[in-house]
Amino acid sequence: MPDPSARDAGTATAQPPAPPHDSVPLSPRGSVPPALVPAAGRRPRRSTRISALRTGLIAGVFVLILLVIFLIQNTAAVQIGFLGAHVRMSLAVALLIAALAGALLMAAAGTARITQLRRNLRRARRASPAQGPGRSA
């Protein structure tokens, strides 16, 4: 029995090249063909706060694992001087203290900015007239 691929080799017709995978074919008017539009009642998938939180937590755990590996590999004792104080401690402990201090500084700055924005929003709401019935100023 002859090979089917050999039989079809002589009857191949020229076909236009396939479009790249990342492009969406457009109709002559430039709109997306109906076959590629989501069905009625189905919304495209959106990111939610919970999914963003989950992604952030996964990234945080990954960074924490890398930090722990880094700390375990740097356990040699070092001499540290800061503002006239000299201390001899493990490099891992010094790095952990520095990382925690940096995180606390960033949290304090973020908290201050959020507080400032909320205060400005409250002032703007008080200054604007009430909108619509049943809404008090």
Image (cartoon, grey):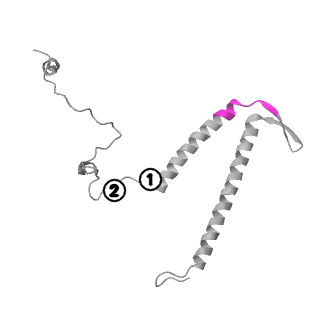
Question: Mark 2 and mark 1 in contact (Cβ < 8 Å)?
Answer: no
Q: Residue furthest left?
A: 1
Image quadrant containing the N terminus: top left
In the picture shown, does residue 109 fall above or below 136?
Answer: above
Q: Which residue is label 1 attached to?
A: 47
Residue at the image position 34 percent from the left and 56 percent from the top: 43
In the picture shown, does residue 135 fall above or below 101?
Answer: below
Residue 129 covered by magenta stretch: no
Q: Residues within 10 Å of mark 1 (few under 14, many from 20)?
A: few
In the picture shown, does residue 34 fall above or below 61?
Answer: below
Q: Residue furthest top?
A: 1
Residue at the image position 55 percent from the left and 43 percent from the top: 59
**Left or right of 134 on screen, residue 93:** right
Q: Position of residue 91 (x, y in %)?
A: 76, 34
Which SS class for mark 1? Answer: loop
Q: Residues within 10 Å of mark 2 (few under 14, many from 20)?
A: few
Residue 76 covered by magenta stretch: yes
Q: Quadrant of residue 85?
A: top right
**Left or right of 128 on screen, residue 106:** right
Q: Position of residue 76 (x, y in %)?
A: 76, 29
Name the residue nearer the viewer: 14 or 24: 14
**Left or right of 51 on screen, residue 19:** left
**Left or right of 34 on screen, residue 132:** right
Which SS class for mark 2? Answer: loop
Name the residue nearer the viewer: 37 or 65: 37
Image quadrant containing the C terminus: bottom right
| Residue stretch in magenta | 69-78
Q: Which mark is residue 56?
A: none
What kind of residue is marked 2?
A: Arg
Q: Position of residue 68 (x, y in %)?
A: 65, 37
Q: Which residue is label 2 attached to?
A: 43
